[in-house]
Amino acid sequence: MQTTLDTLGSVVKAKRKSEQITIEELAERLGISVRYLCRIENKGQKPSYDILFKLIRELSIDPDLIFYPEKPSKDSEIENLIRTLYNCNEQSLDVVKATVKALIEMSERDQTTIHN
């Protein structure tokens, strides 16, 4: 059975790689050394609460993946998008809202055209 620390390292590493973030970039964003991040990812180093919180937020990790690894993953694209939105500033959220609104309006127009 995997321990929480084994799970933490593998989850962080997999998410970092899937987001195409180098270990150096992530360490800089977190304000920690590359060596410390390597120990978290590969050696089971236990991060402080502050660093764990930053890791979860920076990579938009579902905390259940770390704290309840035995729980079946229900991670959907929508849930992942919602976690990502929490990291946006107000300007970025305005752009996202306008984009979504335009996409919905375009979809409604397409549906109207199909039915006519």
Image (cartoon, rainbow, N blue to C red):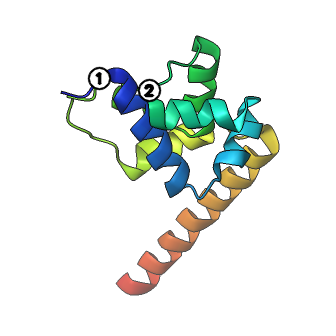
Disc on the earlier residue, 2 or 1? 1
In which quadrant is the N terminus drawn?
top left
The answer to the question of whether label 2 and label 1 lie on touching residues, with beta carbons closer than 8 A, is yes
Between 81 and 63, the residue placed more toward the observer is: 63
Q: Position of residue 66 (x, y in %)?
A: 38, 27
The CA span between labels 2 and 1 is 9 Å
Mark linked to residue 23: none
Residue denoted by label 1: 3
The three-letter amino acid code for the residue at tag 1 is Thr
Q: Which residue is mark 2?
A: 44
Tell me if 70 is positioned left or right of 6 in this view.
left
- Mark 2 is surrounded, within 10 Å at the Cα level, by few (under 14), some (14 to 19) or many (20 or more) other residues, namely some
Please indicate, yes or no, whether residue 67 appears anywhere in the rendered image: no
* Residue 115 horizontal/vertical position (percent): 36, 82
User: Residue 67: horizontal and vertical position, in percent?
Assistant: 35, 21
Tell me if residue 58 comes above or below residue 45 in the rendering.
below
Q: Is residue 91 left or right of residue 108?
A: right
